[in-house]
Amino acid sequence: MALTVLLYSLFEYYRPKPIDWTPSYSNKDKIPFGTKALYELLPDVFGNQKVESLRLPIYNHLSENKLAPKSNYIFVCHTFEIDKNDRNQLLTYVKQGNNVFISAYEFSDTLLKTLGVRATLKAPTLRDTALVMNFVNPVFTKKGGYVFSEDDGRNYFLVKKAENVTVLAQNARNEPIFLKVKYGKGYFFLHNLPLALTNYYALNSKTTDFAFNSLSYLPVLPVYWDEYLKQGRFGENEQSIFRYIMTQPPLQWAYYLILFGLLLYAIFAGKRTQRIIPIIEIPKNTSLEFIQTIGKMYFQQSDHANIAEKKIQHLLLYIRERFGLRTNELDEEFKEALIPKTGLPPLDINLLFSEIAHAGRNGKLSEYALLSLNRRIEDFYQRVK
C-alpha cells in the first residue's frame, strides 16, 4: 500500500500539468491568457519610460495626484466596470492632457455614454467564425489581416458622436474594434479585443505586432498599468498567506478539505467522547458500624463497665424518645409506667432493670455480666418494635 501511494504521488507530481486557458489578463500570469509577456515588454514599447503596476482604485491614485503630470493609464481586462467617483477622476485625468487605454469586452455604460460610444455585441449565428481584424492606418495594415481563433469577433463599437472619434482598427464587417476618442486635451483609446494582448497572441509571430501596434498609438510617456480590477487591492509584497492560498487551486482545495474534515471530526467525535456519567452509590448509614467498632475497642480493652454504661444510656434515650417517660429515677413508679407502654411482662422489665442497677453499682463488670446485660437490652429492642 505504501509503495502504491508513493508511485501514485510521483506520477501526479511529474505528469504534465494541463494548460489553464482561463482569461485572467493579469501581468503576473504566464498562462496563455495572462499578460505577463506584454507587461514585461512595455519599457521597450515606450522608450524605457517608467512602467508601474497599480493595485489601488482609480480614485485613490488620481485624487491624490500620485501619477506623473503627463502619463498613460492602461487597463486590460474582461469587464471594465468602475463607479461614479472613479469615472469622474478618469475623465478629469484625460481632460488635463493624459491618455487612457482600455481594452475590454464589456465597458461601463456611463463612461461610454459620456464619450458618445456604445459597446455592443452581434447576435450569434450558425455562420459565426473568427473574423479577420486589421488596422485602418495603411502603415499598420497587414496583408491578410489578423485572426484570433479564440475570439469570435462579435464584439464591436457603435459610434454616436463621430466628430471626436477616430477608428483605428476594424473587423471584416467594417465594424470598429479600436477607437481613439478625444476628450479635452487628452485621448481615450478604446480597444475591444483584450485577448489580442495576452501571452498567447502577443508571443505568436502571426499576431504579435497587433498588440504592440495597438499600444504604439499612445505617446511616449510614463505608463501606469492597472491590476486592481483583476487582482484586487493588495500587491505581491502585501499578500498574506491566506490570500496566497486562495489564489492557488491545489492549496485552495486542501484548505476546503481541512475545514470539511474538522467539521466531520467535531460532529462525530463529539458524539463518541461524551463525559463519563459517574455512578452514584446509595448513601450508607455508618453509625452502626461506628458503634460496633468503638464497642469492639472497649471490649478488647476489657473496659466492660464503660460499654455497659453506654448501652444503658442508649436504652434510656430510646425509652424517652419512644415512650415519652422520664428516666431520671428508675424506681417502681417508672417501671409501672413502662410496663403497659411496652406490653412486656413485669418480670422481664424487673429483670432488665435489675441487671442495669447491678451494672451501675459495680465499678468493674465481668464479661459474663456484660453479655447478659447486652442480651436483655437487645431482647427488649426486639420485643417492643
Image: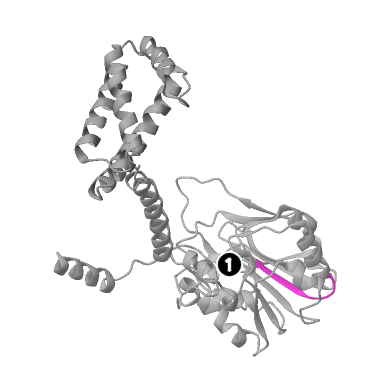
Tell me the amino acid under the disc marked 1.
Answer: Gln
Across and down, in percent, residue 346 comes to 30, 12
In the image, what residue occupies the spot 63% across and 64% down?
229
Relative to 97, is 188 on the left or the right?
left
- Residue found at x 55% / y 70%: 26
Residue 103, percent from left and from top: 62, 66
Q: Which residue is drawn at 42% across and 63% down?
A: 249
Q: In which quarter of the image is residue 140?
A: bottom right
- Which quadrant holds residue 304? top left
46 or 242: nearer the viewer: 242
Spot occupied by residue 147 in the image (x, y as percentages of width and height): 48, 66
Query: Which of the image's four quarters has the N terminus?
Result: bottom left
Look at the image and say whether residue 70 sits in the magenta stretch. no
Quarter-of-image position of residue 367: top left
In the picture of the structure, the residue carrying the numbered disc 1 is 231
Q: In this view, does 154 lie above or below 17?
A: above
Q: Where is residue 268 in the image (x, y as percent from the top left)?
A: 34, 46
Secondary structure state at the residue bearing disc 1: helix
State which region is magenta: 95-102
In this view, the residue in front, 238 or 89, is: 238
Q: Does residue 284 appear anywhere in the picture?
A: no
Q: Is residue 289 left or right of residue 67?
A: left
Is any atom of residue 17 visible in this view? yes
- Identify whether 51 is placed above or below 315: below
In the rendered image, the quadrant that contains the C terminus is top left
Question: Residue at 40% across / 27% down in the picture?
Answer: 316
> In screen coordinates, is 274 left or right of 24?
left
Foreground of the two, 47 or 68 = 68
